[in-house]
């Protein structure tokens, strides 16, 4: 049931993005697909879907690996 809730929430948010009506929490219109995906996944988690958290990425710098 939770997966079904998550799928419905993601579908709803992505439809809003495609229709041009998706806004971020600050009220600004979302124009980039990666941001829309993150919003959809976040809302699905709140709705109870079992979606793993985003993995932390690392980048190499002169001092070694740094969390981003």
Image: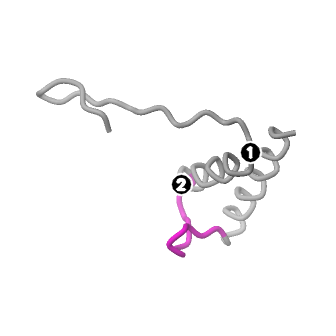
The residue tagged with tag 1: helix, strand or loop? loop
Taking the image as shown, residue 67 lies to the left or right of residue 35, namely: left
Identity of the residue drawn at 56% across and 36% down: 53
From the image, which quarter does the N terminus lie in?
top right
| Residue on which disc 1 sits | 48
Residue 31 within the segment the image draws in magenta: yes
Identity of the residue drawn at 71% across and 56% down: 14
Q: Position of residue 7 (x, y in %)?
A: 79, 44
Q: Nearer the viewer, mark 1 or mark 2?
A: 1
Q: Which mark is residue 35?
A: 2
Asked if 51 appears above or below 48 in the picture, the reply is above
Of the pair 5 and 16, the residue shown nearer to us: 5
The residue tagged with tag 2: helix, strand or loop? helix
Residues rendered magenta in the picture? 22-33
Asked if 63 appears above or below 49 in the picture, the reply is above
Residue 68 within the segment the image draws in magenta: no
Q: Position of residue 65 (x, y in %)?
A: 24, 25
From the image, which quarter does the C terminus lie in?
top left
Of the pair 25 and 28, the residue shown nearer to us: 25
Of the pair 17 and 43, the residue shown nearer to us: 43
């Amino acid at each position: 049931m939770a997966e079904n809730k998550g799928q419905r929430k993601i579908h709803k948010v992505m439809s809003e993005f495609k229709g041009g009506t998706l806004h971020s929490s600050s009220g600004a219109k979302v124009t980039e697909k990666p941001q829309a995906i993150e919003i959809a996944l976040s809302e699905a988690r709140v709705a109870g879907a079992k979606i793993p958290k985003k993995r932390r990425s690392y980048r190499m710098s002169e001092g070694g690996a740094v969390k981003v």
